[in-house]
Image: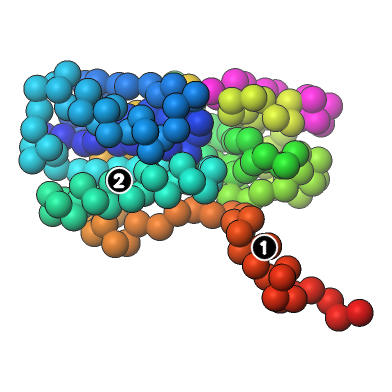
Amino acid sequence: MMWVLAIDTSSPGGAVALLRDDAVIVEHVGDPAVPHVARLPGALAEVLAAATLAPSALDLLAVASGPGAFTGLRVGLATIQGLALALDRPTVGVSSLAAAAWRYFEHQPAGTACAVWLDGARGDVFAAAFARPSGGAGAWPLDEIVAPSVDTPAATLERWRQVVPTEAPLLLGPGGRGREQALAAGRSVVAADAPLAVPVGRIAWRAHVAGRSGPPHALAPLYVRRPDAEVERDRRLGVGVPLP
């Protein structure tokens, strides 16, 4: 039996969850009005205290690796890396899109497909599509049909037209960005605004059992859009800007 600590800072509220293998022991859902950097230490302490568990008892540390807001992702990754280094524990990074899909797949039969959209800001959506493979309880929880991307809802739907089955439901994250375009394209829409720390932990536990965990320095954010600071820097330096 393993104690798994999982955090999600890819969304404004985020969450922290403590699992015993696949079973949820404690879940703490964050307040979107409080920044992750201010909220996370107290949330971690609260979750461990609720289970009367010392940090040294943790076996595996997991984090939502994105896509999501850059600042939130950095806070979550740095927190898990610091804990893992201090405790000498393995880590797993889990895509926020995959976590949203797995929460849906937990109640669906093998062979089911779904698409996921999370708010990418600037009128865009972070998007990916997945299928739940056939197999027993020990099977890997999902297969990626379409890799994570960021684009407008219309452009994403056009790119998916021959790839993602129309009958595959579209899971929309908090805010429901792109709902009208998806419905107009004949897609069924399912709200997917539940916290992601629990599915992050469940996928991470399976990853570890399958030998897919790693050291803290191997964790990396899943960025599908370049940070604004990099774009602005390159603009100032003229990098990638056509000559007049």
For the N terminus, the quadrant is top left
From the top left corner, tell me how far across and down residue 93 is, in percent. 36, 49
Q: Are marks 1 and 2 in contact (CB under 8 Å)?
A: no
Find residue 1 and name its label. none
For the C terminus, the quadrant is bottom right
From the top left corner, tell me how far across and down residue 159 is, in percent. 76, 49
- Between discs 1 and 2, the one toward the N terminus: 2
The answer to whether residue 232 of the structure is visible from this angle is yes
The three-letter code of the residue at mark 2 reads: Thr
From the top left corner, tell me how far across and down residue 48 is, in percent. 17, 27
Residue drawn 70% across and 30% down?
Answer: 177
From the top left corner, tell me how far across and down residue 15 is, in percent. 38, 28
Query: Which residue is label 2 attached to?
Result: 79
The magenta stretch spans residue 185:
yes
The magenta stretch spans residue 163:
no
Q: Residues within 10 Å of mark 2 (few under 14, many from 20)?
A: some
Query: In this rendering, is residue 237 above or below 111?
Result: below
The three-letter code of the residue at mark 1 reads: Val
Q: Residues within 10 Å of mark 1 (few under 14, many from 20)?
A: some
Query: Which residue is label 1 attached to?
Result: 231
Seen from the viewer's position, the closer of residues 16 and 228 is 228
Q: Quadrant of residue 156?
A: top right
Residue drawn 64% across and 41% down?
Answer: 120
The answer to whether residue 186 of the structure is visible from this angle is no
Mark 1 and mark 2: Cα distance apart in space: 26 Å
* Residue that lies at the very extreme toward the right in this rendered image: 244
**Magenta residues (range):** 180-193
Seen from the viewer's position, the closer of residues 130 and 133 is 130
Q: Secondary structure at mark 2?
A: helix
The answer to whether residue 96 is left or right of residue 49 is: right
Residue drawn 18% across and 55% down?
Answer: 85
